[in-house]
Amino acid sequence: MKKILQKEKPPVSADLDEKDLAILRLLQQNARITVREISDAIHLSTTPVHERIKRMEESGVIRQYATLLDHAKVKKGLMVICYVSLKQHNKTAGARFIKSIREMNEVIECYNISGDFDFMLKVVTENMEDYYNFHVNKLSEAENIGNVQSVFVMGIIKQTHQLVH
């Protein structure tokens, strides 16, 4: 099933030194931190800090800056992990499924996985009724759906976006 993903360029390992990693740690903790604050924290002047950040942005190490929201406070308090298997496992069918998933706002993450299912989706909705409507009217209507298993998240124990520690 891995072959059906629409892949981007293969990742190139970046040569990151300790200063780069320190910058990344600070940006992961607070994407709004200023270059001056980073400079002070890692004991490097602002120009090299700015150049390092720019280099990491251009090389794709830093893909984007994001604002993390509290799901419940924006009326997306129900989180569901959906495991999806497809009926057909060919490139065209997989590409159509991926295209349809990308258009579903309720799906905030989608992974191509191994095992009994082909995809794992992270879905957020306001409540069970909204999830039911999403499942019946959107997900189940996607072409080539074989099986869907929904697992309801009862609590979040750990959730982080930090890759560099």
Image (cartoon, grey):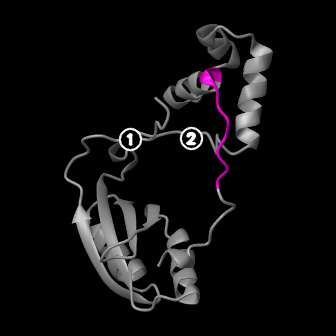
- Secondary structure of the magenta portion, mostly? loop
13 part of magenta stretch: yes
> Residue 158's image quarter?
top left
71 part of magenta stretch: no
Residue displayed at 28% across by 60% down: 127
Identity, as a three-letter code, of the amino acid under mark 1: Asp
Does residue 130 show up? no
Residue ID for mark 2: 66
Does residue 90 show up? yes
Q: Residue furthest left?
A: 154
Which of the numbered marks, if any, corresponds to residue 70?
1
Identity, as a three-letter code, of the amino acid under mark 2: Ala
> Residue 113's image quarter?
bottom left
Secondary structure under the numbered disc 2 in the rendered image:
loop
Q: How crowded is the residue under tag 1: few (<14 C-alpha within 10 Å), some, or many (20+)?
A: few
Percent position of residue 34, x then y: 66, 19
> Residue 53's image quarter?
top right
Q: CA distance from mark 1 to mark 2?
A: 13 Å
Q: Nearer the viewer, residue 125 or 1?
A: 1
Which of the numbered marks, if any, corresponds to residue 134?
none
| Start-end of magenta stretch | 11-19
